[in-house]
Image (tube, grey):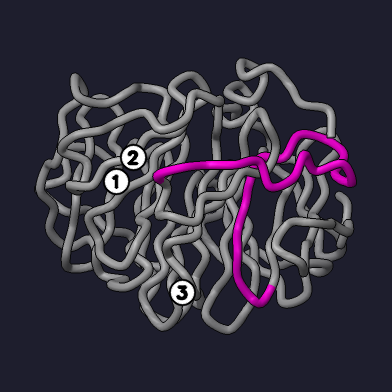
Amino acid sequence: MRLRLRGVVAALLLAGCGGGGGAAGLPSGDHVHSLGVTSDGDLLLGLHGGLYRSGDGVTWELAGLQGEDAMVIASVADQPVFVAGHDVLYRSDDFGESFTPLQPPDLPGLDIHAFAQSPTDGRSVYAYVVGHGLYQSGDAGDTWEQRAGMGQLPQDLFGMAVAGGGSETLVMVGTESGILRSEDGGRSLSRVAEVPAWAVTVEPMDPQVVWTLSAAGLMRSGDGGGTWETASTLPEVEGQPLALAVGGEAMWVVTEEPRALYRSLDSGDSWEQVVGS
């Protein structure tokens, strides 16, 4: 894998592009932002202009949010599915078949760059709202309370995950800030790795295992995000890895330039391309 400068990654993550897409191969046109796996093993792909769904990773169809920015997908088995982004906050109570917009009065904005769902309590979610700070909901997004203001947080956050066995340990990543960790629901943060990172996810069957895409490649933590090691430099992966998901007995990565979907069946040791754009 040819690693890119962090500024290039940040530009790709924030880019807005024109529309397009087809049934065979990855949807084309709109910029890739996020990837998720539903309870039944389907893949959800978030673009700058919509949300797409696939049962095999090869054939995709529009699942909703047409024209909207699906920047973050959060999905936990048998729990609500969330999609968040620029002026976007949706919840699905039927495992991603349909989505309802949320407009909670106590969330001060909907420009959400990072969103996380507890793997042990799917109704506990966190949202990083640009210009306002970090907020937490214990009732699946209906009501919210602030956990940290903007002055307590780095402003380059692009990923967040709830790690460990509870709902108070957070792992956050940024292209300048590196990997940060909180044990009190975001009220305080410590930097645990300085490597630039932009995507993070938790192993569904073991929330102590956390994965992130970084300038070093694929990194792994086995202690809830406390310590990290490089698991793979992704030598089989062409392009810039942007989105990461674990589920359906596999690990998945989506790249840009060129756009492609890769799958690993051995915890990231080796990768195969499933489909290109």
Cβ–Cβ under 8 Å for marks 3 and 2? no
Three-letter amino acid code of the residue under disc 2: Arg
User: Which residue shows up at 40% across the image and 44% down it?
Assistant: 226
Q: CA distance from mark 2 to mark 1?
A: 15 Å
For label 1, the residue is 127
Frontmost of labels 2 and 1 is: 2
Tell me, yes or no, if residue 229 can be seen here.
yes
Three-letter amino acid code of the residue under disc 1: Ala
Compared with residue 146, is residue 275 higher up or lower down, i.e. above or below?
below
Please say whether residue 228 is one of the residues in the magenta stretch: yes
User: Which residue shows up at 10% across the image and 48% down it?
Assistant: 145
Q: How many other residues sit within 10 Å of disc 2, few (<14), some (14-19) or many (≥20)?
A: many
Q: Is residue 197 left or right of residue 58?
A: left
Magenta span of residues: 226-249
Image location (x, y in percent) of residue 272: 88, 59
Compared with residue 54, is residue 275 higher up or lower down, i.e. above or below?
above
Quadrant of image for the N terminus: top right
Tag 2, which secondary structure?
strand
Tag 1, which secondary structure?
strand
